[in-house]
Image: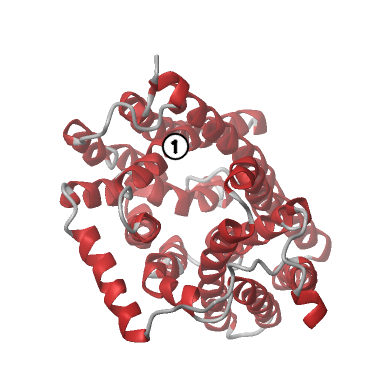
């Protein structure tokens, strides 16, 4: 143990890919896989959207306990401990799915996973900054994002395809999903063991502070005070809450829409087909949209691309509207529509993330960015809770019309946004 602690540096390739793959999987399991699973178990869209939207709460309130991850123990300790708890949560879901009380029990374990995953996010991002120097951080930022996206493809794609195969081959839906979550639990046990021995012990990751608890709490209060007294805070919060308003509702009903029978307005896809369409083709398109969005934003800055990106994240929702009205039989057309919407989401989401970084600038920028992401999660949680009820009242066709109309508040805010024209542009472009 003492000998292992002397290893203050390891090749980042030995732990960054696995760390960020492990960061992405539980979020996908909680936010997306749970929606598809509960739909296959026969829950209504109202119940699914309400219950799973509550699972956003840990990410909403994450800023309130993130300072304690800094002062209690080390980031390394938090990472491996949370991976063990995430594995326990996944195993708990797997054990309870075949039981009569599966809903209450599985939601409780999803809550455990959500809190553990949010805490893991804090620790992993902090560890990344402590274990690498500035040049290494810049080099590996794309690597970590890539493996986070691969986790999304694995969770939303491969695992859903596996669950669908098990459903079809066994004819037992609870058993199929139980096996799927057991596999995930086993994977996290491997992550725990691997990172327990492979993660380095950076000297900066001491988990100690020179301040008293009273000083820490005072600084904690000053951080929040400085955030909520920023110039333009009201408009900024409105933008954070509304920019993804339509997407927050669409994302909760996209998979149920693909799974629901044609008689009730859905497309009647199988579980495996949803894994291919939404979890694989969709995630790849989302990733490509984000990459291209980052490239163009670095050339001309956030201010110039805010309008195009805001339109791009909302107008492609019409793809689902067309699917609902025409209900095409062709699997190719369904994939094309989902890919179009997800590409627009990835491209348009770039402006949102850049704005969070822009508004977080100044003193306490790390803490302020964490608060911004809390508002981002709140903007997903609250509309998502009502999405299922709205859809069941309107039907899928009119629900997607409502989704299009929900983009209007964001578009009304944009003319009032004050953004530095050079923000987001690369130094080379800004010097021209």
Q: Position of residue 71 (x, y in %)?
A: 47, 78
Q: Residue at x 80, y 75 (%)?
A: 4
Q: Position of residue 295 (x, y in %)?
A: 51, 26
Whether residue 107 sits left or right of residue 46 in the image: it is right
Q: Nearer the viewer, residue 102 or 20?
A: 20
The residue under label 1 is: 350
Most distant residue in the front direction: 210
- Examine the rendering and report whether any part of residue 269 can be seen: no
Say above or below: 30 vs 432: below
Q: What number of labels is visible?
A: 1
Q: Is residue 264 above or below residue 47?
A: above
Label 1 sits on a secondary structure element that is helix
Q: Is residue 421 above or below residue 23?
A: above
Q: Residue furthest top?
A: 432
Q: Measured from the top left, where is residue 112 in percent x and y?
A: 55, 78
User: Which residue is pictured at 69% across the width and 75% down the height?
Assistant: 87
**For mark 1, does the 10 Å Cα neighbourhood hold few (<14), some (14 to 19), or many (20 or more) residues?**
many
Looking at the image, is 111 positioned above or below residue 322? below
Q: Nearer the viewer, residue 67 or 41?
A: 67
């Amino acid at each position: 143990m003492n000998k292992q602690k002397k290893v203050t540096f390891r090749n980042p390739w030995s732990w960054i890919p696995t760390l960020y793959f492990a960061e992405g999987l539980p979020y996908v399991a909680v936010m997306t896989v749970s929606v598809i699973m509960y739909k296959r178990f026969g829950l209504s869209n109202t119940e699914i959207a309400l219950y799973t939207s509550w699972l956003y709460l840990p990410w909403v309130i994450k800023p309130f306990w993130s300072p304690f991850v800094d002062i209690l123990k080390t980031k390394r300790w938090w990472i491996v401990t949370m991976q063990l708890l995430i594995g326990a949560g996944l195993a708990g879901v797997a054990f309870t799915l075949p039981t009569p009380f599966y809903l209450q029990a599985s939601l409780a374990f999803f809550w455990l996973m959500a809190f553990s995953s949010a805490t893991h996010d804090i620790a992993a991002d902090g560890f990344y900054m402590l274990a690498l120097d500035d040049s290494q951080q810049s080099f590996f930022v794309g690597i970590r994002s890539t493996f986070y996206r691969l986790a999304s493809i694995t969770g939303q794609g491969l695992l859903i395809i596996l669950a669908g195969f098990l459903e079809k081959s066994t004819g037992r839906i609870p058993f199929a999903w139980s096996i799927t979550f057991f596999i995930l639990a086993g994977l996290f046990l491997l992550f725990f063991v691997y990172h327990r021995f492979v993660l380095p012990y950076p000297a900066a990751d001491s988990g100690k502070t020179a301040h008293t608890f009273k000083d820490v709490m005072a600084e904690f209060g000053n951080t929040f005070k400085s955030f909520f007294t920023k110039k333009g805070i009201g408009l900024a919060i409105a933008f954070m809450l509304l920019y993804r308003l339509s997407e927050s509702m669409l994302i909760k009903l996209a998979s149920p829409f693909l799974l629901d029978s044609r008689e009730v307005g859905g497309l009647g896809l199988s579980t495996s087909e949803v894994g291919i369409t939404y979890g694989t083709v969709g995630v790849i398109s989302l990733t490509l949209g984000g990459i291209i969005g980052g490239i163009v934003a670095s050339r001309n800055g956030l201010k110039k691309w805010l309008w195009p990106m805001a339109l791009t994240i909302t107008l492609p929702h019409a793809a689902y509207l067309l699917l609902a009205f025409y209900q095409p039989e062709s699997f190719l057309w369904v994939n094309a529509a989902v890919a179009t919407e997800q590409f627009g989401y990835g491209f348009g989401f770039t402006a949102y993330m850049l704005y969070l970084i822009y508004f977080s600038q100044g003193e306490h920028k790390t803490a302020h960015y964490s608060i911004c992401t809390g508002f981002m999660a709140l903007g997903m949680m609250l509309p998502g809770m009502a999405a299922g009820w709205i859809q069941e009242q309107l039907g899928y066709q009119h629900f997607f019309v409502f989704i299009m109309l929900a983009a209007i508040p964001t578009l009304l805010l944009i003319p009032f946004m004050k953004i530095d024209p050079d923000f987001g542009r690369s130094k080379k472009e800004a010097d021209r």
